[in-house]
Amino acid sequence: MAHSRARRNPADGRAPVRRAAATVGTVFLLVGALGFLPGITSDYGDLRLAGHQSGAELFGVFQVSVLHNLLHLGFGVAGLALSRTVGLARAYLVGGGAVYLVLWLYGLAVDHPSAANVIPVNAADDALHLGLGLGMLALGLLAGRDGDRR
């Protein structure tokens, strides 16, 4: 028997794909903000607007720049905004997953120390982009299969 004073889960009644899009969007907002915090971003003094010269690394692993962090923040805002309907949430997850798979391919194709590495990315970013792309695609395709059209 449930406790009579138990709080209602605010996610109750929301389609799983909408919750997934909102969660992914929140994580992107958090990561984008963390990219601007010294200490969490190592070599923060080497953070550049864009390009491979940016020596800052989120968690000491993922190469970031101001542009890279702003892209994460933009993906976060988009995730929260598009989580309002099932169709938009699915489009965000599937479309975002496709974008991250393209970024993974970009990371594989670009010479990391070259001027073409504008975002910038390193090998850790490449692996993360593959995981994000596949994960977002899976969430968009599988979480939206419940038929809920709210």
Image (spheres, rainbow, N blue to C red):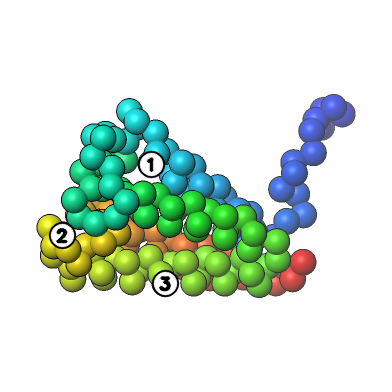
- Residue that sits furthest to the front in the current view: 49
Q: Residue at x 57, y 58 (%)?
A: 79
Instruction: Identify the element where label 3 is drawn.
Output: helix
Q: Amino acid at mark 1?
A: Gly
Nearer the viewer's eye, disc 3 or disc 2?
2
- Residue 9 position, x and y percent, is 74, 41
* Image quarter (top left, top right, bottom left or bottom right) of the N terminus: top right
CB atoms of marks 1 and 3 within 8 Å:
no
Q: Residue at x 32, y 62 (%)?
A: 130
- Residue 35's disc is 1
- Can you identify the residue that label 3 sits on? 98
- Residue 20 position, x and y percent, is 58, 56
Residue 40 sits above or below residue 23 on the image: above
Q: Amino acid at mark 2?
A: His
**Could you say which is closer to the camera, residue 67 or residue 73?**
67
**Could you say which is closer to the camera, residue 27 or residue 41?**
41
Q: Residue at x 38, y 65 (%)?
A: 100
CB atoms of marks 3 and 2 within 8 Å:
no
- Residue 91 position, x and y percent, is 57, 72
Q: Residue at x 28, y 35 (%)?
A: 44
**In 3D space, how far apart are the residues under numbered discs 1 and 3 (Cα atoms)?**
23 Å
> Few, some or many C-alpha atoms within 10 Å of disc 2 (few <14, some 14-19, many ≥20)?
some
- Can you identify the residue that label 2 sits on? 112
Which badge, 3 or 2, is on the more N-terminal residue?
3
